[in-house]
Image (cartoon, rainbow, N blue to C red):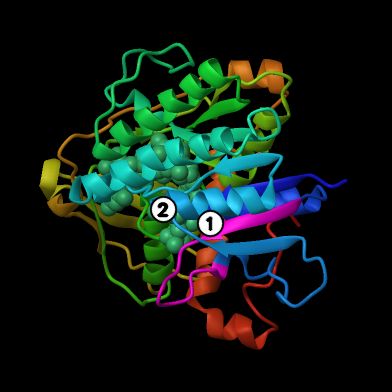
């Protein structure tokens, strides 16, 4: 019998990669999708089958993490072997604007699923994965961060995820549910949400290179993140649920890089070297040299990066760097992508996306499978 998985947040970056990954492994995959007034299934359209097809292996259900009745009904219907709880209001800066909703969806939403597993008598059948985050370390108490590093959340998002983390541990200990946390450090890809810093940068650099935009406005350039590729990270989620015992794992690359350096790397992919000058909100990024296809638009001496304080956060997480040794030792997990490969992947994709009419003429843009 094929295994059945239920993925909340299936329309998001990780949900899309994980759905494709599990389908390739022969799973039947059910996904939770929010109703929206405009289509929100771009990332999974290549996996979707006509609902009238016989025995489809990929099924979407309308629902929301803030609605327990609907979660209980769907989980009862599906009787999943594995649940991956990836749904969340996942933007740290936005969580300062919507703190109560974030607590409801990201914190209590996790409890709702665990309670559904318990109430439906699935404690011995269903394995549960919680999308925990390196944001839990916040004002870091140790460098690098491990599974034993104390948490110090610095945003409503991180505080809500802290509850999600501990309620997962509690249901494991109290009810013997196979419930595990993946403490994932930042992971990116060509389908990363457009307002996270990496994708904001690769999209803007592509537009600047094509003459469609003049300036990229950013917030804190000195923040450091441990950036991996979402493809590597969804494999870790799967491995966490295949392990013989439930446990909590740091998933990271072990390297950290400044936002400023990510900007330099993205422009380099388009053929330009960026020099940063000035301090604080006066800091600017100037094109120092440029060669290749986009040199005409990437004019030497032009200012292409500026600071906009609106992107600063009331409390910032300055430095994240994880130690994934436990995952390497117990799960055999090893990332394939380094940061240079991630930037290349994202820049190639965004340069194509910005000229998508050309690619549509050449036979379609969004028709590839992620793992091919
Ligand atoms: P994402 O692209 O923002 O996707 C979030 C998903 O959650 C989307 O499918 C979204 O639906 C859905 N969602 C949001 N609120 C919901 C609600 N109330 N009910 C049901 N669904 C809801 O996030 P991601 O980057 O894939 O991250 C996946 C998970 O890992 C999140 O829990 C995130 O907090 C966590 N995480 C991410 C990273 C990272 O670097 N990417 C690192 C650590 C942890 P719509 O498409 O309708 O918006
Ligand atoms: O890309 P970010 O918005 O990601 P952040 O805050 O690290 O959160 C992401 O990773 C977490 C894992 O650690 C996830 F749990 C979470 O769901 C999300 O996926 O910002 C990265 C850094 C921050 O320090 C931010 O202040 O980039 C800095 N930054 C500088 N300018 C900016 C900008 N961030 C954004 N989004 N936009 C800017 O213009």
Which residue is pictured at 28% across the width and 27% down the height?
Answer: 153
Q: Which mark is residue 346?
A: 1
- Determine whether the residue tagged by mark 2 lies in a helix, strand or loop: loop
Label 2: how many Cα within 10 Å (few below 14, some 14–19, many 20+): few
Q: Where does the image place residue 185, in percent across and percent down from the top left?
A: 47, 33
Is label 2 within 8 A of ligand 1 (CB to nearest ligand atom)? yes
Whether residue 14 appears in this view of the structure is: no
Q: Which residue is mark 2?
A: 67
Q: Is residue 46 above or below residue 5?
A: below
Residues rendered magenta in the picture? 28-42
* Viewer-proximal residue among 257 and 56: 56
Q: Is residue 162 above or below residue 306?
A: above
Which residue is pictured at 60% across the width and 16% down the height?
Answer: 325
Q: Where does the image place residue 26, in percent across and percent down from the top left?
A: 82, 50
Q: Where does the image place residue 220, in percent across and percent down from the top left?
A: 23, 42
Q: Where does the image place residue 131, in percent across and percent down from the top left?
A: 50, 37
Whether residue 95 appears in this view of the structure is: yes
Q: Tell me whether the residue at label 1 lies in contact with that at label 2, contact meaning CB atoms closer than 8 angstroms.
A: no
Cα distance, mark 1 to mark 2? 35 Å
Upstream in sequence: badge 1 or badge 2: 2
Q: Which one is in front in this view, the residue at disc 1 or the one at disc 2?
A: 2
Residue 68 on the magenta span: no
Which residue is pictured at 60% across the width and 19% down the height?
Answer: 176
Toward which corner of the image does residue 221 lie, by quadrant? top left
Toward which corner of the image does residue 60 lie, by quadrant? bottom right
Q: Quadrant of ligand 2?
A: top left
């Amino acid at each position: 019998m094929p295994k059945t998985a239920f993925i909340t947040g299936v329309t998001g970056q990780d949900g899309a990669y994980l759905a494709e990954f599990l389908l390739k492994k022969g799973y039947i995959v059910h996904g939770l999708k929010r109703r929206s007034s405009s289509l929100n299934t771009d990332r999974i359209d290549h996996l979707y089958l006509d609902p009238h097809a016989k025995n489809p292996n990929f099924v979407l259900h309308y629902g929301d993490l803030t609605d327990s009745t609907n979660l209980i009904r769907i989980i009862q219907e599906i009787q999943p072997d594995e649940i991956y709880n990836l749904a969340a209001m996942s933007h740290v800066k936005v969580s300062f604007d919507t703190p109560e909703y974030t607590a409801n969806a990201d914190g209590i939403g996790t409890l709702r699923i665990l309670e559904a597993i318990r109430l439906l008598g699935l404690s011995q059948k269903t394995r549960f994965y919680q999308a925990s985050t390196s944001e839990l370390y916040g004002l870091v108490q140790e460098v690098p961060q491990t599974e034993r590093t104390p948490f110090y959340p610095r945003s409503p998002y991180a505080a809500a995820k802290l509850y999600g983390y501990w309620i997962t541990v509690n249901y494991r200990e109290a009810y013997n549910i196979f419930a595990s946390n993946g403490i994932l450090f930042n992971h990116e890809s060509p389908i990363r949400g457009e307002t996270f810093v990496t994708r904001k940068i690769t999209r803007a650099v592509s537009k600047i290179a094509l003459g469609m935009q003049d300036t990229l406005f950013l917030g804190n350039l000195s923040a450091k993140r441990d950036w991996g590729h979402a493809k590597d990270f969804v494999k870790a989620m799967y491995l966490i649920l295949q392990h013989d015992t439930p446990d909590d794992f740091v998933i990271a690359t072990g390297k950290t890089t400044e936002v400023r350096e990510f900007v330099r790397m993205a422009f380099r992919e388009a053929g330009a070297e960026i020099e940063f000058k000035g301090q604080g909100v006066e800091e600017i990024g100037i094109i120092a040299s440029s060669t290749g296809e986009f040199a005409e638009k990437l004019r030497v001496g032009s200012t292409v990066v500026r600071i906009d304080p609106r992107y600063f956060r009331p409390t910032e997480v300055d430095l994240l760097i994880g130690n994934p040794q436990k995952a390497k030792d117990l799960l055999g997990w090893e990332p394939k992508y380094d940061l240079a490969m991630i930037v290349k992947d994202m820049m190639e994709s965004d340069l194509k996306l910005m000229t998508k009419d050309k690619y549509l003429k050449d036979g379609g843009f969004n028709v590839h499978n992620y793992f091919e």
